[in-house]
Each structure stands twice: as structure tokens, then as C-alpha cells.
Image (cartoon, rainbow, N blue to C red):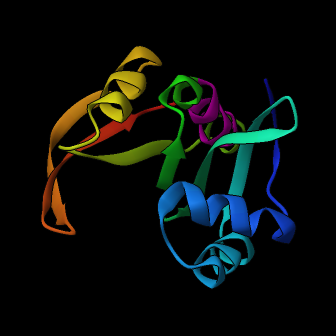
Amino acid sequence: MDVRDAVEADAGRLASLTDTPRDVMRNLIHDRTVRVAEQDDEIRGFVSYDAREGTVHVTQMDGDPATFQRLLEEPMRFARTEGMAVELLAPEDEPQLLDAAIAVGFDEVGRGPRFEGQPTTRLRMLE
């Protein structure tokens, strides 16, 4: 599996992974750091993140749960280089995301805000 920067041409595939409009994903690619996991020239998953106030925030992750641990390495590497922490919110209805984050070293630090009606768990990793 290869991980690379997302490009505008990826917006259609990312939209199909997330069931969101293509324009929304194109804007995400322009506004955030977005990395995609590819296997056999097919996008299998992606992660988006941004950095502010000393923390790298994972803003979205979707696709094949088998890609999640590898994709989380991307914001973790950036955070380590910059001396920052990493945070993410795992929705209750996405246990694979929670499991992947814990497997790579994130700690549960409490409840997060509700997102689209779903309770979330806040996870954090200090680098």
C-alpha cells in the first residue's frame, strides 16, 4: 500500500467513499492536508488533518478500515517533526477508527462533542 498526497483529481473517489458531494471533497483537498492510501491504483482510504494551536487535528478519515493505522502515521509523523500533539474524535458508530487509533498509541481522554448526532470519543497522542 502506498500513501501519497491527495490531488484534485482524487475528489470524485473521495466523494464516493464518504457519500458527500465532489465539490466538498475538492475543497477539503485544497483546505487541509489530505493523504490517500492506494493499492493497485485504487484509493482505499484517506485522512485529512490540519495544525493549529500546538496540536495536529485529524479532521476526517474514511475508507477501508484496514488502511486506518497506516493513514494515522501521517499526522503522527507531522506532529513528531513539529513537536506537537495529535487529536482525533472517533464517532461511536465507527469503532474501527477508535481501535486503529488505540493500536497506534492514542489514549482516550474523554468524551468529545456530538458530531451529526453521534457521540464521539476524544483521543490524544503526545509526541
Rendered position, 23 above or below 92: below
Rendered position, 105 above or below 25: above
Does the magenta run of residues contain 74? yes
Q: Position of residue 96 (x, y in %)?
A: 35, 29
Q: Nearer the viewer, residue 65 or 4?
A: 65
Q: Quadrant of residue 100?
A: top left
Q: Position of residue 28 (x, y in %)?
A: 63, 73
Residue found 63% across the figure and 25% down from its top: 70
Rendered position, 9 above or below 5: below
Please state the extent of the stretch shown in magenta in the rendering: 70-78
User: Is 115 left, or right, of 51 in this rendering?
Assistant: left
Q: Quadrant of residue 11?
A: bottom right
Residue, far top = 103
Q: Position of residue 37 (x, y in %)?
A: 72, 37
Q: Position of residue 103 (x, y in %)?
A: 41, 15
Residue found 30% across the figure and 38% down from its top: 123
User: Is 117 left, or right, of 76 in this rendering?
Assistant: left
Numbered disc total:
0
Residue found 42% across the figure and 19% down from its top: 105
Camera sees residue 56: no
Q: Nearer the viewer, residue 13 or 72?
A: 13
Q: Nearer the viewer, residue 75 or 1?
A: 1
Residue found 50% across the figure and 47% down from its top: 62
Rendered position, 90 above or below 103: below
Camera sees residue 2: yes
Locate the N terminus by quadrant. top right
Q: Main secondary structure of the magenta part?
A: helix
